Amino acid sequence: MHVPDGFINAPVSLGAGVVAAVAVAVSLRGARRELAGAGQSAGAGAGAERTAPLAGLVAAFIFAVQMLNFPVAAGTSGHLLGGALAAILVGPYTGVLCVSVVLLMQGVLFADGGLTALGVNVTDMAIVTTVVAYGVFRGLVRVLVKVLPRRRQQSVTAAAFVAALVSVPAAAVAFSALYALGGTAEVSIGKVFAAMVGVHVLIGVGEAVITALTVGAVIAVRPDLVYGARGLTRPLELRTSPVGGGREQAAGSGSVRGTAEPVVAATAAARGDVPDAAAPRRSARRLWLAGLAAALVCAGVLSYYASTSPDGLEKVAQDQGLDAKAKEHAAKGSPLADYSVKDIGDPRLSGGLAGVIGVGATLAAGTGVFVIVRRQRRRGTAVRPAPRPAAEARTEAPAEARPDAPVETPVETPTEARTEGPTAENV
């Protein structure tokens, strides 16, 4: 659904650019909290260590999977948009930044999506999909967790499927609205709306499958890294059981003396719970490497077998005449334009190498952005003085009890000496 230059007129494109800039600025502030683990009982540092490396990888993975166009109808293909996937894995604010980085890399390096239409694409593919998907996901997952309390991981995966399914037609509706405001072609909005929503409902099915499979794979091995699964834990149920064959009667006392040990009533794996964020931290390196390998395989190998049919917007533009005033891309001379390396004749090698370069560039750009955001969060937190706990103030020893406090020797005054009562010696 990458909108080329010339589909939307300049005033509306400029307005969409302003909306996109404001949304990105707001997302930068929100991403600081998400990357610092806001809302986790494990603390800000733990959340940052877990989420920040994953955010750059999510951007690279979305870029790679977007190269895998899949057929949805006769002569039409679709591809992942990624807003739902990013929002569920790393949070809605960070998700907006992930998709925005992908769109920027695609527009500048690969001439995919117009440069003057970058604000339109960010608004349509990054903001709308992320906001709609995460809203649907949070509302649905809460209902599913209550209805199926023993299937919490499955509830997260099912909610991710529905959220992704809804997000793609929502983006089609948003494009139709932008076209109604500033479309350059002489095509009725009714035809554009019907064609766009109709084909993108089918594309949404593919988006939902990819999103659910990815979220399900991550939550199966590292549920603590799925942002959308936070806050879905149940309190640990404990019961006590006597050790040593039962109760022992204390001799002559009549009291029951027993040694009890905590026993988990039902394990998290058996009941489908998502482990608490306060669980002992584990390195995310294995998952990060596995995700990077999957992105490289998708972009470098599987992209050669992707459908060559036009995607949903391109097909609608061809059929309805939306591309009548489309303009050539300003970066059409890029050595990576159209996802192929210039001067390499073998299409398999050219496309695969371009995909690998794109994954690396997106990973570097995304990780750089999120590292900067995280450091700004740490710097802002460091300058704030920590509040003094009330318990510490109450339990602080008095000055005369502290070893480092000076010792004051009481001096007897003459009045005290005269009024002192008789002692045992002088009686």
Image (cartoon, rainbow, N blue to C red):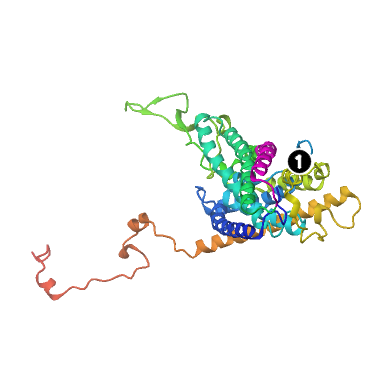
In this picture, residue 408 sits left or right of residue 46: left
**Residue type of the residue flagged with mark 1:** Ser
Q: Which residue is drawn at 78% across and 36% down?
A: 74
- Crowding at mark 1 (Cα within 10 Å: few <14, some 14-19, many 20+): many
Q: Residue 171's x, y, as percent?
A: 63, 45
Q: In the image, is residue 78 above or below residue 256? A: below
Q: Residue 300's x, y, as percent?
A: 81, 48
> Where on the picture, by quarter, is residue 221?
top right
Q: Nearer the viewer, residue 416 or 290?
A: 290
Residues in magenta, as a range: 185-214
Q: To which residue does mark 1 refer?
A: 77
Residue at the right extreme of this rendering: 345
162 is within the stretch colored magenta:
no
Q: Residue 394's x, y, as percent?
A: 33, 56
In this picture, residue 307 sits left or right of residue 422: right
Quadrant where the C terminus sits is bottom left
> Where on the picture, by quarter, is residue 424?
bottom left
Q: In the image, is residue 125 above or below residue 270? A: below
Q: Residue 121's x, y, as percent?
A: 66, 53
Q: Which of 151 and 187 is in front in this view?
A: 187
Secondary structure mostly seen in magenta is helix
Residue 52 in sight: no
Q: Residue at x 57, y 44 (%)?
A: 132
Label 1, secondary structure: give it: strand
Residue at the left extreme of this rendering: 427
Q: Residue at x 13, y 71 (%)?
A: 416
Count of picture labels: 1
Q: In the image, is residue 389 above or below residue 69? A: below
